[in-house]
Amino acid sequence: MDQQYTPLAQPILYRILDANLDRTREGLRIIEEWCRFGLNSGELAEECKHLRQEIARWHTMSLRSYRNTTDDPGTELTHPQEEQRSGIEQLLQANFCRVQEALRVLEEYGKLYHPEMGRTFKQMRYQVYTLESRLLAHERHKVLQNSYLYLVTSPGEKLFAIVEAALQGGLTLVQYRDKTSNDEIRLKTAQKLCQLCHRYDALFLVNDRVDLAVAVDADGVHLGQDDIPIQLARQVLGPQRLIGRSTHSPEDMKRAIQEGADYIGVGPVYETPTKAGKAAAGLEYVRHAVKNSTLPWFAIGGIDMNNFDDVMATGCERVAVVRSIMNAEQPTLVTQYFLSQLHRVRNLRTHKVLPS
């Protein structure tokens, strides 16, 4: 298999290849375990396994025999960021970076080892890029599917404390909405909120601003009817991020589904100061969504503890709130109340006690 190079260079080359083959297999195994046990995705786990097996084919005993861990100065190198992970997403991103960097090393040094090795690992690197996008999309869609309460924020001095309190109560979906602050403030706020949400393995979305969502590595964006087209947002965000769309009528809903939204907002159910001057779509539109939406959807607009039962009586399963949590004295308890009621309604419908 070997090409011609000096006797001195051969051990060095073999050690480089061995170390990076190990690094690639280790990183892929960490990713595979999450695909298997965290996402319950046999398809993604099988893809990781296939890549590991292909790498193992190149990891021959002739390469392993040159391993010299005792004299390797790299074993002492570390970085504080490697000693902790803020959540599953950061863990996965770190290991994807590790795998991709190692594959690039194998691609370049592999050209000295065997004519096919460089080409093989170049293609594998692109496969891993695609796998990363698919896994992130799968992960986000899974969290979305399991999210029944959606918090849309409003500006305030206690913004971060309120959001964290809601996250502690079990919230898994947050949208950052701020129509008045300048971009510098919005960027700093979005960055901090994104980090906070990911610490609790919750999704973080940005209202309206696709550029801001990309800048802070948000999980997606929520677009109003007057915002840019979904297709354009998808080109900027890529396939792995979520795009939501506000809808106010059956026609809006149909169009959002056709354009490829990942979820929709249905409302406003009641008149609300958040949408000043916007007429309520009412419970009739919620009933329409129950029967016709093929996407996850959230009833939104003036929903609170007083009218919650009326909204649920339509067959609705998911709600989005603003003031009910943002203005609450105890956001954690209010979040837990909403989640417990949503869970109770789903259980009753599962056992046919309530109509769906």
Image (tube, grey):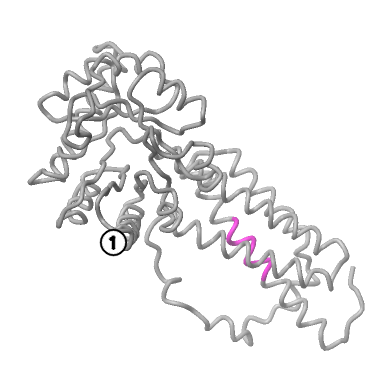
Q: In the image as oriented, which residue stretches furthest toward the left?
A: 329
Return the x and y of residue 314 as percentages of the image width and height.
25, 15
> Is residue 76 positioned above or below 190 on the image?
below
Return the x and y of residue 343 as percentages of the image width and height.
25, 28
- Tell me if 198 is positioned left or right of 64 in this view: left
Which quarter of the rendered picture does the N terminus lie within? bottom right
Q: Secondary structure at mark 1?
A: helix
Looking at the rendering, which quadrant does residue 144 occupy?
top left
- Tell me if 281 is positioned left or right of 75 in this view: left
By secondary structure, the bulk of the magenta-drawn segment is best described as helix
> Which kind of residue does numbered mark 1 sit on?
Ile
Return the residue at label 1: 185
> Is residue 288 positioned above or below 89 on the image?
above
- Tell me if 83 is positioned left or right of 73 in this view: left
Number of numbered discs present? Answer: 1
> Start and end of the magenta stretch?
20-28
Q: Nearer the viewer, residue 218 or 254?
A: 254
- Tell me if 34 is positioned left or right of 151 in this view: right
> Is residue 94 positioned above or below 89 on the image?
below
Query: Is residue 272 covered in magenta?
Result: no
Q: At 46% from the left edge and 54% from the top edge, which residue is drawn?
A: 214
Which quarter of the rendered picture does the C terminus lie within? top left
Q: At 20% from the left edge and 39% from the top edge, which residue is drawn?
A: 322
Q: At 38% from the left edge and 32% from the top edge, which residue is drawn?
A: 225
> Is residue 37 positioned above or below 92 on the image?
above
